[in-house]
Image (cartoon, helix red, strand yellow):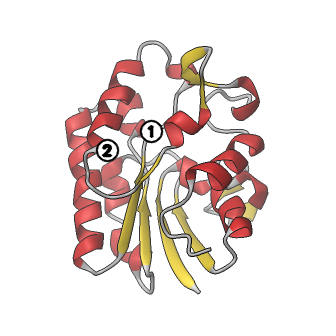
Amino acid sequence: MTVIACLGDSITEGSPYWDSRKRTGEPEGQWEHWAALRHPGLEFRNFGIWGQRTDEIAARFEEAVGGADALIVQGGINDIAQGRPIDDAAARLGSMVERGLSLGLSVAVCDVLPWNNGWPGKEPAIRGLNEQIRALGVPLLPFHDTLEDSERPGRMKAEWTNEDGDHPSVAGYRRLGELAFHPFASS
């Protein structure tokens, strides 16, 4: 088994279908669930917490990587939602990537999803942060493009977003797990 630590915010957690504090919910509302079904030789450990910024995610790095073979880093939308500089968020994501690589882990990073409730005002920040994420030099899980509606750029397709307009639906999480996840798959 290859153990993959998934470190991030509500998108990693599986919100609103999974509550990391209570460790309860619908596993089908997590992209890791769908990726694990497709790749049975991988064990996904979910270290996602709703509402966290990249500085808060980085503070949990050591806990997440213990015993892991690989690391997936995800985050940034909460920094954008709170009006924090995207350069700082990108630097923190990059630092987590570097820390993982220095430990000998295989590392990948996710880009930021389209945000229906933040469109159009937050769209430039999302695209800007995603450019910086793509430049980190490790495999990218293309979460943004996997859920973006080609007819309504900058937003998730209706069937791929939860009614809250902030998170993927179960169908959206399934799409992320089946289509966007790929870097560590051996089969």
* Image quadrant in which the N terminus is located: bottom right
Question: Alpha carbon of mark 2 to alpha carbon of mark 1: how far?
Answer: 9 Å
Indicate whether 120 appears above or below 33.
above
Q: Position of residue 153 (x, y in %)?
A: 53, 18
Residue shown at 67% from the left, 55% from the top:
30
The disc labelled 1 sits on which kind of residue?
Answer: Val
Name the amino acid, label 2: Ile
Q: Is residue 157 left or right of residue 62?
A: right
Q: Which of marks 2 and 1 is nearer the N terminus?
A: 1
Mark 1 crowdedness (10 Å alpha carbons): few <14, some 14-19, many ≥20: many
Residue extending farthest to the front is 187
Residue 131 appears in the figure: yes
Q: Which dot marks residue 133? A: 2
Is residue 182 rendered to the left or right of residue 36? left
Q: What element carries label 2?
A: helix
Image location of residue 151, percent across then percent down: 62, 14
Q: Quadrant of residue 138?
A: bottom left
Tell me what residue is drawn at x 71 percent, y 34 percent: 160
Q: From where the camera sits, is residue 83 visible?
A: no
Q: Are marks 2 and 1 in contact (CB under 8 Å)?
A: yes
Image vertical order of residue 122 relative to residue 39, above or below: above
Can you tell which quarter of the image residue 148 is in?
Answer: top right
Image: 26 above or below 134? below
Please give the label number shown on residue 36. none
Q: What element carries label 1?
A: loop
* Residue named by callout 1: 112
Residue 186 rendering spot, x and y as whole percentages? 56, 75
Residue toward you, 36 or 62: 36
Q: Which residue is drawn at 42% across and 69% down?
A: 71
* Residue 101 located left or right of residue 121: left
* Mark 2 residue crowding within 10 angstroms, few (<14) / some (14–19) / many (20+): many
Q: As rendered, which of 70 and 24 lies closer to the eye?
A: 70
